[in-house]
Image (spheres, helix red, strand yellow):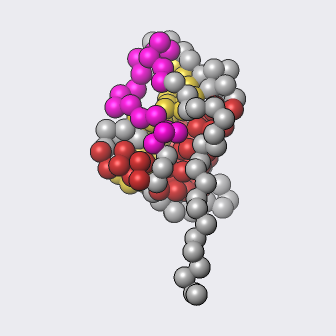
């Protein structure tokens, strides 16, 4: 379906896979929109351990639709819960987009999300905007090349000593 020059897809029609509980679609669905220079993914619901597999499928499906130099925009404003693991999944996808010559931008207006991203060290790798960019000229610069997108965790001290 074409609407004002944009391709719109409803991702919620993806049936659960064999290793996904059948009701994950009820807990997490998304809209996907193709725009010039970008794919916008707008998930709704909650991303937790139960919906983790579906979350990764939605991100990967949107990323596969990117052209060279395109931006993957993940609009999180309709989520009611987002786990720290889901933020790490976004950072991994940001690294993949960057390696392929593209970018990933997170759209969020929830202050807690920005605080959590900073607290776990992903804020420099996940640029956050409060609105979906209007067009290709409104693009956020990619993360710095030459550094891993997901920061390495310091080794844990053995607490049994």
- Give the magenta-colored segment's residue range: 123-140
Q: Is residue 96 left or right of residue 131?
A: right
| Residue 16, percent from left and from top | 60, 53
**Residue at image point 47% right, 12% down:** 137
| Residue 113, percent from left and from top | 37, 47
Q: Which is more toward the observer, 4 or 56?
A: 56
- The quadrant the C terminus occupies is bottom right
- In the image, is residue 152 part of the stretch drawn in magenta? no
Q: Which is more toward the observer, 19 or 152?
A: 152
Q: Which is more toward the observer, 112 or 58?
A: 112
Q: Which is more toward the observer, 2 or 113?
A: 113
- In the image, is residue 127 part of the stretch drawn in magenta? yes
Q: Is residue 57 above or below residue 32?
A: below
**Residue at image point 50% right, 15% down:** 136
**Residue at image point 59% right, 79% down:** 158
Magenta-colored segment: predominant secondary structure: loop
Within the image, what quadrant is residue 131 found in? top left
| Residue 2, percent from left and from top | 52, 17
């Amino acid at each position: 379906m074409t609407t004002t020059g944009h391709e719109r897809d409803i991702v919620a029609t993806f049936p659960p896979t064999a290793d996904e509980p059948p009701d994950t679609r009820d807990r997490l669905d998304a809209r996907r929109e193709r725009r010039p220079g970008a794919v916008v993914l707008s998930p709704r619901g909650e991303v937790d351990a139960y919906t983790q597999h579906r979350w990764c499928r939605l991100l990967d499906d949107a990323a596969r639709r990117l052209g060279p130099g395109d931006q993957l925009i993940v609009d999180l404003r309709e989520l009611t819960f987002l786990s720290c693991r889901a933020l790490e999944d976004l950072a991994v996808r940001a690294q993949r987009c960057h390696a392929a010559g593209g970018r990933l931008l997170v759209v969020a207006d929830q202050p807690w999300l920005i605080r959590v991203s900073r607290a776990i060290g992903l804020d420099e790798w996940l640029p956050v905007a409060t609105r979906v960019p209007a067009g290709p000229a409104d693009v956020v610069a990619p993360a710095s090349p030459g550094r891993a997108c997901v920061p390495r965790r310091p080794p844990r001290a053995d607490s049994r000593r």
